[in-house]
Structures are given as C-alpha cells and as structure tokens.
Amino acid sequence: MSDANPKNEETKNAMDGSKPAHPTYRQGKNVIAVASGKGGVGKTWFSITLSHALARQGKKVLLFDGDLGLANIDVQLGLMPKRDLNDVIRGRLGLDKVIQRFEGGGFDIIAGRSGQASLSALPSQRLTMLRDQILDVANQYDVVILDLGAGVDRTVRMLSACAARTLLVTTDEPTSLTDGYAFIKLGSAAGMSKNVGIVVNQATSQTEGEKTYKTLLKACENFLRLTPPLIGMVRHDRKVKETIRHQKPILIRSPDADAAMDVEKIADIIASDLSKRRKKAAQSA
Ligand SMILES: Nc1ncnc2c1ncn2[C@@H]1O[C@H](COP(=O)(O)OP(=O)(O)OP(=O)(O)O)[C@@H](O)[C@H]1O
Ligand SMILES: [Mg+2]
C-alpha cells in the first residue's frame, strides 16, 4: 500500500496546519467513536452490536447516531424515533430529552435525522456545543458509542477527538484500507489519532483478518511512525445482512452467529480498556 492523496477541501485542511480539529479539547473517558475512511464497511451495524454486547454485560450504554444528516441506526433497528437530533439542533430540546430507550437491546439511543441539510453542515460553534452536550450526557453512562459518518470531515474530526478511543473499521478491500490509512494520517495531523485502534470487519478468516491488519499497520509504521493496535476482527457472516433486513439486532435474532460472537469478544476488550482508564484516572486524581 502506498501513501494516499487527500481528496477534498476538508481533508486538505486537516493536513496543512497541524491545526487541531477544534480549539478547545474536551474528552470523554467513556466515549468510544466508530469511524472509517471508506463508507459501507459496517460501522453502524458494528456500533449497534457493540452497544448491545456491552449492555448484555450489564453496562449502561448510550448509542449516538453521529452520522449527522445520513442517520441510520433507527433504520437498522426498525425504530421510529419521536424525537431526534434535529430537535436539539433547532434548540427545541436539550440532548438529554431526545434519549430513547431501545428496550429490545437494553441500551439508550440518540437518533439522527436523514437528509437534513442543517445537520450535515453544522457551523463549528454549533458542533462544539453538540460535542459538549454529548460529553455532559456521557456522565450518566458507563459507555457512550458514537457511530460516525465515513471520512474525515470536520464533524468526524471533532467527535473522534472527544473520544477516549476511536475504532477505525476497515475491510480487506484495497479502497477501504487506503481510505483507512488516509483517516489515520489526516487524523494524526488533526491531533486525534493517538487513540485509534483497528477493527477488521467482514474478514474471511482469522488469518485473512490478521493479514489485513498487518497491511495497514505496515503503512502506518513506515509512513507515519504510528502503531495503531488491533482491537479485534469480525468475520464476514451472511447472518449480518439477514438481521439488518429484518431490522433486528444480531444478538437477538442470531446470537450464535460468528459475527455476533466476534463483536462480543471486542466488547470484552473495550470493557477492560475502559476500566483500566477509569482506574488510571482515579489514581492520578
Ligand atoms: N461482518 C459482516 N458480515 C457480512 N456483512 C456485513 C458485515 N458487516 C457489515 N456487513 C454488510 O455491510 C453493509 C453496510 O453496513 P453499515 O450500514 O453498518 O455500514 P456503514 O459503515 O455504517 O455505512 P455508512 O458509511 O454508509 O454509514 C450491511 O448492510 C451489511 O450487509
Ligand atoms: Mg453507517
């Protein structure tokens, strides 16, 4: 894999100055962002399943639809949210008032709104306010998962930078790997890649998943002097498509599916990562 070129204005901006994504830098110790360079790699499905797996471990979980303007957590779960982020952006409701319980999964959701131009292009001051509201709401939870849009635009940079860990989801497709590498590169210029970990999705086998990770790792080591760790891999599984089609979480419809079990393993890793961070924070307080 070779070094990648930036494709648009946003990515260029992130690269030129080593300007941070935003002036004030707030982070949530229990916030996990799920991102990808290329779209359609499985972020939303993975975010839902990870939230569900953590909830099944007894954690209090909030899943936030951070793909502003192209939301689809509600679609994958077959929900019809009465309130969503649009009410927050229009100043009608506080973020805490649009939280909804997803009873079937035992976790809470903040739904987005698809096709809403005002959400997809939030002015940066409004975005900073939203980020702050997310971090305030995060205090009521053990874990908050942010399902982000693909790419490295301003919204992604800001939401990723406020997370304790960003899980970069990639598949073995060359374009997914190249765009994943670009995400890490541009993210590091924007000061947000320190905590990036890799999740290989749709792996045909353990060995193939490891190969995918090593390809990305090698490019990061050679060109960026970064060594993002492998957080886990999820096997390609036809049950994923089937459960999405039925708008039911895989951990309800097919809990024994390979992909479901793989995400449960990742949830164990995330839970222990978060508890280590909590202990460290308590020691240094
Ligand atoms: N482990 C898997 N095995 C098989 N298919 C998968 C797996 N993960 C995801 N998919 C397929 O990938 C499709 C895209 O998933 P999803 O919508 O979650 O991706 P996304 O990264 O959120 O996309 P976008 O960038 O558009 O937000 C799903 O409809 C599903 O068919
Ligand atoms: Mg998505």
Image (tube, rainbow, N blue to C red):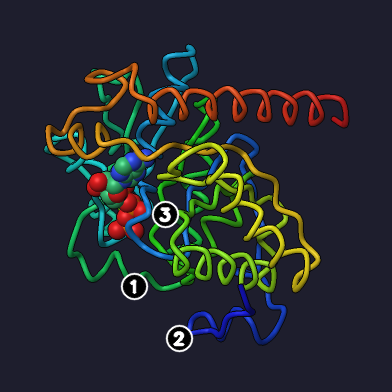
Residue drawn at (24%, 55%) of the image = 86
Is the residue 81 above or below the residue 252 in the image?
below
Q: Which residue is drawn at 60% across and 30% down?
A: 270
Q: Say which amino acid is labelled 1.
A: Ala
Residue at 48% across, 54% down: 170
Circle 2 — which element?
loop
Secondary structure beneath label 3: strand
Q: Mark 2 points at which residue?
A: 8
Judging by the rendered image, the residue that carries numbered circle 1 is 121
Q: Are marks 1 and 2 in contact (CB under 8 Å)?
A: no
Q: What residue type is labelled 2?
A: Asn
Q: Which of 278 and 7 is in front in this view?
A: 7
Beta carbon of the mark 3 residue lies under 8 A of ligand 2 = no
Q: Position of residue 42 (x, y in %)?
A: 36, 48
Q: From the image, tell me which residue sits under label 3.
A: 148
Amino acid type at circle 3 is Leu
Q: How far apart are marks 2 and 3 (CA)?
A: 18 Å
**Alpha-carbon neighbours of circle 1 within 10 Å: few (<14), some, or many (≥20)?**
some
Taking the image as drawn, is residue 93 in sight? Answer: no
